[in-house]
Amino acid sequence: YSYLLGLATWSEDRILDRVFLHALADGTRADQWPALRWMSEKAVPGALPLLEVLWPARDRPLLRPLLVRALVGNGSVSHNQEFMDLALGKNPEDAELALEAVTALGTLADDTAIPLLLRLSRDKAIDLAVAAVRALGEMGHAAAVPPLARLSRGEGEVAEAAVWSLARFQQPESLQARLRLVDDEGTPDDIRKTAMETLGPEDDPGIFPALRAVITGTRSPSDPLVRAAWRALRLNAALENGGEAMRFLESHANEKIIYSISSCGLSLTFADEDAGPPQLRVTPAAGHTLRCWAGPGLTLEFEDELGVRVPSGWPIALGDLYEGPDEILVRPEDGGPFEDCWLPLDQLQWRELTAAENEPEYFDDFWMSPTSAEFDIPLHESLSETALLLQDADLIEFFDPGPESIGAALVLDGIGSERRDLLLLLSEAGDAPLLQEALEWAWEDLSEEDDAED
């Protein structure tokens, strides 16, 4: 029963609220875990009294991090001091609970927690420091702006989190702190790039000069910082309705074109006098492939087919563009098998294809290399018995989880005859149809290779 409850947590059907309330009130500890997971992501009417009953118990250490999140998400405001105490947990086994407590303090926005969060923002445990910085941004208290500005002048994950937290504030001091990062060439490149990504659209006269200085500096037009500056400039230029930034964009329209895109009535071209014929190529952040989205925020419907993933290095010509609050998505103009995909722009890079390079190989159903095969499957199939057995045998890795799907990488290199036979055996198990279809194809491909060698 607890296994079925775990699968049900991936659903969005609120009719399950009553099922999880019953599991929380009368179920075993194994039942309570999926119930808490459900309530940590959704406010469930009638859940708070049950959660408050569970909170004092100290014999459920594995449940307590989820319980913290569920309490706050369902409106509890009576445990601030306890959460502050938990955030200071020094035992390694309390690390996850401390992170949840810090996140809860940010959501509750109690300004008495600010000194503690500032202290934790300098903690040696990077995860805890980053969580504290994000919590300061979530709280939104103006007193946090100066210390966040100081943290942003550092390096690494804490500084990057500080930049994003600063972007949550409307105070002029927040924008000025981010513009100083853009202006300062001594700032690490990743922090400057993050600062540019937070600029906009905002109506401030200081933005254009800062971005123009990066664009017209000594860096190559293909440099990630320059590309980030162009994107930020494009987002902000429309606010001026033909002002200085727009004129700057128009003045570059007749130079050598690398690409041209249109969105929200604005066309933009980028120039690079030294580059040869350009190619925009897929550069995934995880694995060797990139998820193909059906639309902004929409996973492809699986029906009876595996989810397509675009292989690293695949050439992309920019077509349609969608600018969301957190990312920019593009659809290839002529993507061949991927022409219906939407791809995140930040995982595409300009790169020329030399004569010595080969085009990535694409199979009709999923991408394969000599060592692995990657594809998307429904999220619930990654929890199946088949998936667990494959993981135990080191035959599969899961990565890039999405709202309804997850990336899967089958290991094909050096697996031996016994584990190869396991692929065939599990392909007939029946509890994960799409995953098992991939196993069958992989087994057939390996068998054909053996026949060719013989």
Image (cartoon, helix red, strand yellow):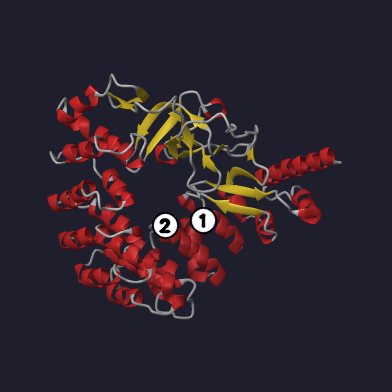
* Rendered image quadrant of residue 238: top left
Residue kind at label 1, given as amino acid type: Thr
In the image, residue 263 lies at what x, y percent?
32, 27
Foreground of the two, 185 or 199 = 185
- Residue drawn 19% across the image and 50% down it: 180
Q: Which residue is mark 1?
A: 9
State if disc 1 and disc 2 touch (CB < 8 Å).
yes
Q: Which residue is mark 2?
A: 41
In the image, residue 290 lies at what x, y percent?
51, 41
Return the mark for residue 25: none
- Residue drawn 56% across the image and 59% down it: 5
- Mark 2 burial class by Cα count in 10 Å: few <14, some 14-19, many 20+: some
Taking the view exactly as shown, the residue that stands out farthest to the top is 254
- Mark 1 burial class by Cα count in 10 Å: few <14, some 14-19, many 20+: some
Q: Quadrant of the N terminus?
A: bottom right
Of helix, strand and loop, which one carries label 1?
Answer: loop
- Residue drawn 34% across the image and 63% down it: 131
Whole-number angstrom distance, CA of label 2 to CA of label 1 = 9 Å
Taking the view exactly as shown, the residue that stands out farthest to the right is 454
* Rendered image quadrant of residue 306: top right
In the image, residue 433 lies at what x, y percent?
68, 45
In the image, residue 370 lies at what x, y percent?
68, 43
Say which label, 2 or 1, has the lower sequence index: 1
* Rendered image quadrant of residue 74: bottom left
Image-based side of 210 in relation to 453, left or right: left
Image-based side of 210 in relation to 82, left or right: left
